Amino acid sequence: MNGPASSAALRIGAPVALGVVVLVAWQLLVTLAGIDDYLLPSPLSIVEQMIEFWPALIAAIASTGLNALIGLVVGSIVGIAAALVASLSRFFDQLTAPIVAALAVVPIVALAPVLNTMFGADSEVGRRTMAGLAVFVPVFINTLRGLQQTRPVHRDLMRAYAATRPQTLRVLTLPAARGYIFTGIRIASSLAVISALVAEYFGGPRGGLGSLISTSASTSAYARAWAYVVGGIVLGLIFFLVTAALERLASPMSRSLTVTGRSK
Amino acid sequence: MSPLDETTDAVVATGVGKVFPAGNVTALEGVDLVVRSGEFVSLIGPSGCGKSTLLRLIADLDAPTSGTLTVFGKSAEKARIDQDYGIAFQQAGLLPWRTVSANIELPLELHGVGKAARKQRSAELLSLVGLTDFADRFPDQLSGGMQQRIAIARALAEQPSLLLMDEPFGALDEMTRERMQTELSNICAETGAAVVFVTHSIPEAVFLSDRVVVMSPRPGRIETVLSMDLGSASERAESLREDTAFFEMVTAVREALHQGAPARGVDDR
Amino acid sequence: MTALDAPPALRRRRSPRVALTRIGIGALGILAIAAIWELYKAFGPADGVVIGDSRILPRTSDLAMPHIVDMVSRLFEPVTRADGSPPLWLEVSGAAAVTLGIAAVGWVVGLIVGVALALVMVRSRLAESSLLPWIVLSQTVPLIAFAPVVRSWGSKIEIGAFEWQDWMSVAVIASYLAFFPVAIGALRGLQSPDAIHTELMRSYAAGWWATLVKLRFPASVPYLLPALRLAAANAVVGAIVAEVSTGLRGGIGRMIVQYAGQASGDPAKSWGPIFGAIVLGLVAAGSVALIGGTLGNYRRAEVNS
C-alpha cells in the first residue's frame, strides 16, 4: 500500500475498477431485472444508438462545442481585462463587486429566452452570450485574486529597483497571476459547455446536443437521448482536459515536475 | 554605476524618527548615524528595536516622519531612483518563474541594459557566488543557502556602492550561515561597497563589521556604536572565529546589548 | 470571492461610513448597467450590429430591448387583462417560492449525500481512491444534460403507496448539481486538520468518531460554507433548468419560457420572471450565508472552493 508503485496502481486501478463494476452492474440490472427503457436504458443499447446516429452525434457535438468555445474565449478575455482594470482601480472594483457577486449566484440560464429575442431566434449568439456570461464570473474572480498574489518582499524589491507600474505589471504581477488565470479558465470551461448545452432547452436553432437530447426524450427514444448525453459528457471532458493541460503548463509549480532537480 | 566622490559618506542620518500611524507606534526615535564609503556597519538589537525599519528608511521603502536622511549626499528617494544601492532581504525573494540567471538579470533588464551585457554580468556574478552550474535552474530547485547567494548576486548586479541587507542569513542553518559570512566578507573586499547589515546574531555582526550599531527597543534608538578592530575585510578568514580578539568583541557587543535592554531575541550564535 | 465572501471579522472592522460608500458605489454600478442598456437602445442601430452573418450586438426594438422603466412598471400591472388578475410581481413571487421549495429539497438531499460520501472517503482510503476521480470528473461534464430524460419518470414509478411526482424529478436534478460542491468541500474540510492536531487527538487516545466530532467537523466549516453557498446556487439553476426541460408547471422556469412566448405582444412581461429568478438566486445564497453567520467562530479562516 505504501510503495509508490502500489499507490499509483491504487490511484488508477481503483477508479477504473469501480467504473467497470458499475457499468456491468448497470447492464445486468437492466437485462435481468427487466427495467424499462424510460427509467434507464442499458449501456449496450446506448452504445448501439451512438453508432447508429454517429454523424448526427458528431455534428451536434461540433455545434454545441463551437458555441461553448466562443463563449469561453470571449468570456475569458473580457473577464481578464475587467479584472486588470479592477486591480488597478479601487473605484471600478467597488463598482463591479456587487454585480459579480450577484452573477455568481444568479441563474444565468434565466436570460436564455430574452437573449434569443434580442439576437434573433435563428441566431446562436444568444447561447454564446450565455456561455460567455457564465465563463466571465470564475475567470474574473480568479484573475483578480491572482493579481493580488504578489508577496511583500517582491513588491519591496520592485520599489527598490524604482520599477515603473507597467514594468511591475509585466515582470511581477502578471506572471504571479498566470496560474490563477488558467485555474479560472479551467473552472469556466465546464460552465461554458453546460451553459451552451442548457441554453438549447430554451429554444433557438436546433441541431445541438441540448435540442437533440430534448427531442429524443420527448419522442420516447430514451436510449438515443442517453447517447446524446454521452456526447455532452465527451464534450465536457475535452474542454476539461485541454484547459487542465493549459493550466498545468502555465503554473510555475508544474515546471519542477518536468525538470529533474534536487529536492530541498 | 556611481561616479561618486570617495569621501562622500554613504549614509548620513540626523535625528531620524519613524512613527507608524496604525496604533501610533514609535518605531525609531532620534537616530544619528554616519556610514562612511566602503564601510561595513551592522545594526543589531532585539526584535522591535527598529533595525529593519532603519534599513527600510535608507532604502526609501518607507519615509521617515522626522529628521533628515541622505544617501551619497542626496535624498533617499533620489538615491533609490538613481539605483545607488543594492538590496537583499531575509527571504531570498527570487521570482519563482524565472531561472537563476534571469533572476540576477532582473534589475539590469528593468533599467534597460542590453541582452549581451546582461548575460555577461550574470555569468560574472554567478562565478562570484560559485553557482555557475546552476544558471538555468529555477529557484525551487535550489537549497535555501543557494537561493540566498543568488539574491546577493542580484543585489550586486548593478555594482552598487551601497549594499542594504536585512537579515539575509536569518533563515539559514548555522553551518551554511558561517560559510555565507566568509563569502560575503570576501565579496565586500572585492567590490569595496559600503554595507548596512541588519542581524540579530552577535558573532555574525562581529565577524563581518567594521562597526556594530547596538540598538534598543521601545522606542527604537541607538544604544551605542562599537568599533571592531579586527582588520579589514580581506584579512578576515575562518580562523578569526577562534581568535581571542573576536571573543572579546563578542563579549563587548553582548554587554552593550544587555545594558540597553534584556537581550531576549538576540542569538548568541 | 468578493464583498459577500469576506469573513465577518473583516467586514465588521470597517467603519459604517466606509461600508456606506461601498454600497453607494455598488448601487452606482447597477445604475451604470441600466444606463448602458438605455443608451445603447437609444443610439444603437435598430437591427443591431451584424458582422458577417452573425449579430454580435442585439437589436434595439422595444420587442428585443424594452425600456427598463417598462420592465419595472410591468411588475405592478395585472398578469392578464382578465378581471381580478393579480399583479405580475405577485404571480412571479409565487412561482419563485415554488422553485425555491423544490431547490431547497434538492439542496438538503445534495447536502446529505455529499457529506455522507465525504465521510466514506475520509474513513477509507480505498473509497477515496475509487470515488474521488469520478466525483471530480462528473463536476466537469454536463450531467444536467439528462434533465429531459428524467421527465419520463413522472407518474410511472409506483412503490406501494408512494408515487413518483413530477416535482421530484426536478428535485433530483437540483440535488445532483448541489451534491458535487458539497462532497468536494466536505472532503477537503474534513482532511484539513494539520498533522499536529490529529496527533494531538491520537495522544489523547481519542477514537475516530471523537476525532470527527471534536476536530474534523469544526475544521471543515470554513470549507463547507462556500461549498454550501455554491450548492444553493447550483440547486436553483438545476431546479429552473429541470422545470423547463420536464415542463413542470407552477415554478419560475416554466414561467420564463411561457412569458417569453408571449413576448411579441408584451415584451416587458418576459422580464418579470427573470427578475424573479435573480432574486431567487440571491435569496438562496443569502439564506446559506445567514446559516454561516451563526457559526462565527468556526469560520475564522474561510477558504474559497
Image: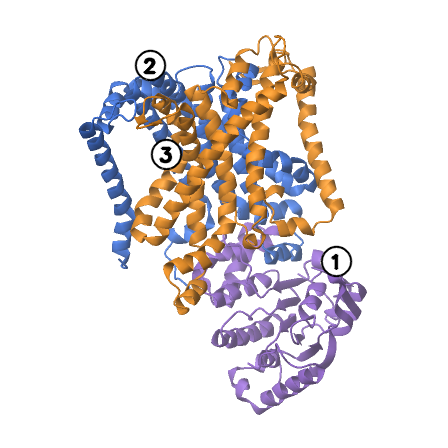
Chain colours: A blue, B purple, C orange
Q: Are marks 1 and 2 in contact (CB under 8 Å)?
A: no
In the image, what residue occupies the spot 70% across and 24% down? Answer: C35
Instruction: Give the Cα distance between marks 1 and 3.
Output: 56 Å
> Do the residues marked 1 and 3 share a common chain?
no
To which residue does mark 3 refer? A237
Say what amino acid the circle numbered 2 marks. Thr
What is the chain identity of the residue bearing mark 1? B
- In the rendered structure, the answer to whether residue B60 lies left or right of residue C187 reads right
Q: Position of residue B167 (x, y in %)?
A: 60, 70
Q: Which mark is residue B78?
A: 1
Q: Position of residue C95 (x, y in %)?
A: 54, 23
Q: Earlier in the sequence, mark 3 or mark 2?
A: 2
Say what amino acid the circle numbered 1 marks. Lys
> Do the residues marked 1 and 2 share a common chain?
no
- The mark closer to the camera, 1 or 3, is 3
Label 1 element class? helix
- Please identify the quadrant where the N terminus of chain B is shown: bottom right
Q: Position of residue A6 (x, y in %)?
A: 25, 55
Q: Are marks 3 and 2 in contact (CB under 8 Å)?
A: no
Q: Residues within 10 Å of mark 2 (few under 14, many from 20)?
A: few
